[in-house]
Amino acid sequence: MDQTTKIEIRDLNVFAGKTQILKNINIDIPKNKITVILGPSGCGKTTLLKCLNRLTDLYPELKVSGQIMIEDNNILEAREDIYKLRQQMGLLSQRPYPLPMTIYNNIAFALKLRGIRNRRETHKLVMHYLQQANLWDEIRTRLREPASRLSIGQQQRLCLARGLAVNPEIILADEPTSALDPISSQFIEETFGRLKNDYTIVLVTHILRQAKRIADNVVFMYLGEVIEQGSVEEVFGNPKMEKTKLYLGGTFN
Amino acid sequence: MTRAQKIEERFFKLLMILATYFILAILAVIIYSIFEKGIKSISWEMLTQVPQGGYYYGKGGGILNAILGSLALAFGATALAFIIGLPVALYLNVFLIRHKKVISIIRFLLDLVWGIPSIVYGAFGFSLMIFFGLQTSLLAGILTVTLFILPIMIRSMDEILCTVPIGLQEAAYSLGSNKSEIAFKIFTRQSVSGIITAVLLSFGRGIGDAAAVLFTAGYTDHLPNGLLEPVATLPLSIFFQLSSPVPEVQNRAYASALVLTLIILIVSLFSRGLGKRYHKTKINF
């Protein structure tokens, strides 16, 4: 395969107390592609995603070991620069969490963290990122309203815009459409399709059709283990492992 | 629903209704009796003058000394407790997130000191004053009341701050915020109305307490005159007026209680209005 690897996960193990949540994970995530992590609920997909930007730090019960290399940087070892490191990755969670401030300030907050304080530039970039997330036209007159007044679908796109505003290289998305109606979901999926030219996208989902629609690469996980990984054609067209076949056939989910 | 379930449902509904209205009725009686007795004695003179000689035996004058004293003391103590208390509550919820045991020990200790009667704080403050060679003064009163309301302030803020959803924290961390940004920009904004309630609760406890100020702030018939001079307070003023053998003076005690209640009412309304302004940006989950 002639693709550059953006994220290299090696021997990643995560324990919560005595239970092992992730077992010996090894994954290569290619640059500027959409990598879908697929698997039934409770298989460790979300935990895997949280390891990537070290949100696991917030959970004292999780013990993480192994290596996650992003361009020669082992994420799991970085100590001081974790806040900078997280800015390389935008996060989109299962349900939107807008910050408790106005729509405009949600984006401006992210820009400020990136070091942009100039008002005119902030103005321009707020518009830019809202357009990128496909939200600008709907809310251009409502920028000073609290973000809490937006619909769930709009909130999720606001969160996407906010995630982009820190200028990341990677987008982490954790079942980003699971709380959304079909039209909002389609909006998000389309946006991802456009964004992959500039970003490396890691998307966690349990929805087969969604994976099929937008994935370039698929990683199938089951009970904390990677069962199979490869291009979407390989995994969906010609699955090698029995469990993958069963899941794709809808026998369990 | 079966018949038994219906009866059960009705029984508990009735019980809840009774309990609610019972407590409301008692509150209404207290407020009514304060109003009823107080309104007769309240006068412009009472609100604008200090006690004249023999006030407690029925001579003229008013309780301006206690009104101003209480306001100075309660605002001072509440402000001080807020300045100390908010960082503590934020520290617990943001910085100690990986140390659940430490958090629970600190919470336990705070709950413990919450239960200490205010007279003990008064005695503690008094012994400190002797140690430092201080007189009864506004400053000593403020410091003692601050100590007394701090656990209330911290724990009620803490209860609000710990409801900030982990998802919101993750969202803010993933943007690259550090902990102090999360504390002061996310936690406080999301919890403004709860923080105001905590401040209000502490203010109410501070302004209404007599025992903590008895030995520390002292009492005087003069207006507050600097941090190092003793001040009068409404609860003590009520106490002294109630102790008077003259019925007319006892009624003035109810008028003073009315004034105290009205102060708390005004401060509540004001801060609730303030809270509403910020409530709009709160995210509801």
Image (cartoon, coloured by chain):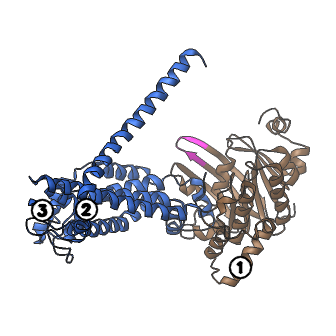
Chain colours: A brown, B blue
Measure the C-alpha gap from mark 1 to mark 3.
59 Å
Between B28 and B281, the residue placed more toward the observer is B28
Residue A158 is left or right of residue B194, and the answer is: right
Measure the C-alpha gap from mark 1 to mark 2.
48 Å
- Magenta-colored span: A14-20
Q: Is residue B142 above or below residue B17?
A: below
Report the residue marked by disc 2: B145
| Number of other residues with Cα within 10 Å of mark 2, as a class: few under 14, some 14 to 19, many 20 or more | many
Local SS, label 2: helix
Q: Is residue A218 above or below residue A193?
A: above
Disc 1 marks a residue whose amino acid type is His
Q: Is residue A9 above or below residue B75?
A: above
Report the residue marked by disc 1: A123
Local SS, label 3: helix
Where does the image place residue A177, in percent across and percent down from the top left? 76, 51
Where does the image place residue B81, in percent across and percent down from the top left? 33, 64
Residue B281 has which mark?
Answer: none
The answer to whether residue B121 of the structure is visible from this angle is no
- Pointer 3 chain: B
Report the residue marked by disc 3: B127
Quadrant position of residue B170: bottom right
Give the residue drawn at x 73%, y 48%.
Answer: A179
Residue A62 is left or right of residue A27, and the answer is: left
Q: Choose the circle earlier in sequence order: 3 or 2.
A: 3
Q: Is residue A235 above or below residue A111?
A: above
Measure the C-alpha gap from mark 3 to mark 2.
15 Å
- Pointer 2 chain: B
Give the number of the mark in front: 3 or 2: 2
Disc 3 marks a residue whose amino acid type is Ser
